[in-house]
Image: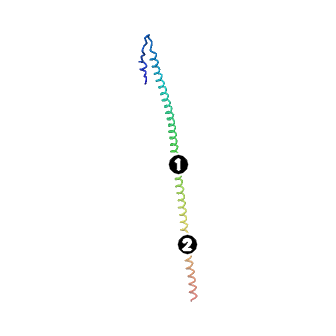
Amino acid sequence: MRITPLDIQQQQFKGKVFGGLDAEDVDSFLQMLAQEMEDLIRENSEIKEQLHRTESEKEELTKRESNLRETLFAAQRVTEEMKANAQKESNLIISDAEIRAEKLLIDAEKHLAQLKNDIQEIRRQKLQFESGFKALLDRHYKMLALDQE
């Protein structure tokens, strides 16, 4: 039975014949009050203990949340750094490939120019050979013609 403050204020004890209070009524009421106080103190202690556990759990969850946020931010930073490094590396690879391609192109153009020069030289030598051979044939022809006469 719950006793309210109003119950305590309105409690009336039976009077005895000689003007006192009935001791049994008072003792019974005090016993009920003591039991009620004991129940309230126990309930209050349980609630405080539960509150303490809840606050500890909340604090632990707050720490976990903070750690998770820090981990997430760290992971995001690492991801961004990895992206940036990958971009830099790809730019370096592309630049290196462009430089090598340009060098290959320059070397190919030089080789082409050398081949053209070699072809011109061979043509010149061919013409010179043909001209010299023709002159030799002409001389031999003239010598043969002189010999036949």
The secondary element bearing badge 2 is classed as helix
Say which label, 1 or 2, has the lower sequence index. Answer: 1
Near mark 2 (Cα within 10 A), the count class, few <14, some 14-19 or many ≥20, is: few
- Identify the image quadrant of residue 145: bottom right
User: Three-letter amino acid code at disc 2?
Assistant: Ile
Furthest-bottom residue in view?
149
Q: What number is the disc on residue 82?
A: 1
Give residue 76's position: percent from left, percent from top: 50, 45
Q: Is residue 4 positioned above or below 138 on the image?
A: above
The secondary element bearing badge 1 is classed as helix
Q: Which residue corresponds to mark 2? A: 122
Q: Nearer the viewer, residue 105 or 84?
A: 84
Furthest-top residue in view?
18
Residue sitting at 55 percent across and 72 percent down? 122
Tell whether 118 sits left or right of 29.
right
Near mark 1 (Cα within 10 A), the count class, few <14, some 14-19 or many ≥20, is: few
Q: Nearer the viewer, residue 55 or 87?
A: 55
Q: Is residue 122 positioned above or below 146 on the image?
A: above
Number of callouts in the render?
A: 2
Q: What number is the disc on residue 43?
A: none
Residue sitting at 53 percent across and 55 percent down? 93
